[in-house]
């Protein structure tokens, strides 16, 4: 199936009234407050917001790694109650096992899932090809550039064929040129596989370039301040960055972020 580029998509992942409080010495600290977001089947959605607004916490809850204080996460309408193969999560830090080759890193989740050796080898080869890593299958992470390390981390997440791919600022540690090539690559992967993607980024241009929709979150506690449809022609390319329509959308997201910073804070938690 191909990615959704227009019209409403049926919800693949949805959060309902998602609230998260952390226990601190002075008392509960509310990080997320009644968050409702959704990712359609085959849709690419980005979340932007200031540091500390709970974006990464939301991804951790969606992946089943954290428990919500209130609310729930639904995958195809069923509650997510813990970690599993339903979501693949990729962090800004590469989180690779340094003693395992690229192929062995990609195979890790398949080993945990109990896939037999022949099926594992084929699945790993397929996703190394998708992420343009076939020539580096036997390399160790210490021999790779930052971009190749992140490609390996994404291949590992995709190899389990998750329902949703969660990306937590995945290109934030890369230089500008590598970041641009990774944006092009992830767009190509999304078009090819049609995987539903929810991505956190601080980069407004990145959010507009990659996604069908952008959620703007308010400063802590994170709330959905705005939701913006991104109606740009497909396939997307970085050549669009100079396009007036693209720049207008970026200015709109920037303005929405600015409005959240100026809003009067309200008591939380």
Image: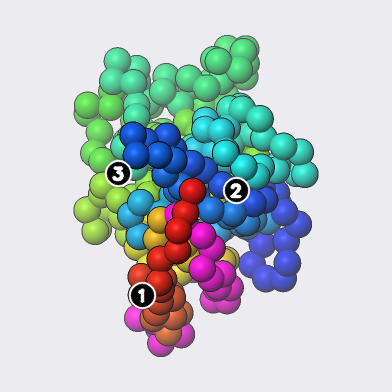
- Magenta stretch bounds: 221-247
Q: Residue 92, located in which quarter of the rendered image? A: top left
Marking on residue 120: none
Which residue is depicted at the point 42% across and 34% down?
Answer: 23
On screen, residue 236 versus residue 42, left or right, reads left
Regarding residue 265, the answer to whether it shows in the image is yes
Task: Give the CA distance from mark 2 to mark 1.
Answer: 24 Å
Mark 1 or mark 2, which is nearer the start of the sequence? 2
- Label 2: few (<14), some (14–19) or many (≥20) C-alpha neighbours in 10 Å: many
Q: Secondary structure at mark 1?
A: helix
Camera-nearest residue between 124 and 261: 261
- Judge whether 55 appears above or below 248 on screen: above
Disc 1 target residue: 262
Q: Residues within 10 Å of mark 1 (few under 14, many from 20)?
A: few
Residue 212 image position (x, y, % from top left)? 57, 66
- Disc 2 and disc 1 in contact, CB within 8 angstroms: no
Left/right placement of residue 16 relative to residue 107 reads right
User: Nearer the viewer's eye, disc 2 or disc 3?
Assistant: 2
Marks 3 & 1, CB-CB < 8 Å contact? no
Residue 76 pos. (x, y %): 75, 44
Mark 2 to mark 3 CA distance (whole Å): 33 Å
Is 93 on the left-hand or right-hand side of 234?
A: left
Q: Closer to us: mark 3 or mark 1?
A: 1
Q: Position of residue 223 (x, y in %)?
A: 51, 60
Q: Is residue 176 left or right of residue 233?
A: left
Residue at image location 35% in from the left, 60% down from the top: 50
Q: Residue at x 76, y 38 (%)?
A: 78
């Amino acid at each position: 199936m191909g990615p959704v580029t227009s019209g409403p998509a049926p919800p693949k992942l949805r959060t309902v009234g998602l609230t998260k409080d952390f226990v601190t010495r002075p008392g509960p600290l509310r990080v997320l407050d009644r968050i409702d977001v959704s990712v359609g089947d085959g849709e690419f959605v980005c979340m932007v917001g200031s540091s500390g607004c709970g974006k990464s916490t939301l991804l951790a809850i969606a992946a089943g790694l954290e428990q919500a204080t209130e609310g729930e996460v639904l995958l195809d309408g069923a509650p997510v109650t813990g970690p599993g193969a339903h979501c693949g999560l990729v962090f800004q830090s590469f989180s690779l096992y340094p003693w395992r080759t690229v192929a062995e890193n990609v195979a890790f989740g398949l080993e945990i899932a109990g896939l037999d050796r022949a099926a594992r080898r084929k699945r790993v080869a397929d996703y190394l090809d998708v992420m343009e890593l076939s020539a580096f299958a036997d390399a160790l992470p210490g021999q790779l550039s930052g971009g190749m390390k992140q490609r390996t981390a994404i291949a590992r997440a995709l190899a389990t064929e998750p329902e949703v791919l969660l990306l937590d600022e995945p290109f934030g540690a890369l230089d500008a040129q590598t970041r641009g090539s990774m944006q092009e690559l992830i767009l190509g992967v999304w078009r090819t596989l049609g995987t539903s993607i929810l991505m956190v980024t601080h980069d407004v241009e990145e959010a507009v370039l990659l996604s069908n929709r952008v959620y703007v979150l308010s400063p802590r506690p994170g709330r959905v301040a705005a939701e913006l449809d991104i109606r740009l022609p497909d396939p997307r390319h970085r050549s669009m960055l100079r396009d007036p329509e693209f720049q207008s959308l970026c200015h709109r997201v920037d303005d929405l972020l600015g409005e959240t910073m100026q809003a009067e804070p309200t008591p939380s938690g």
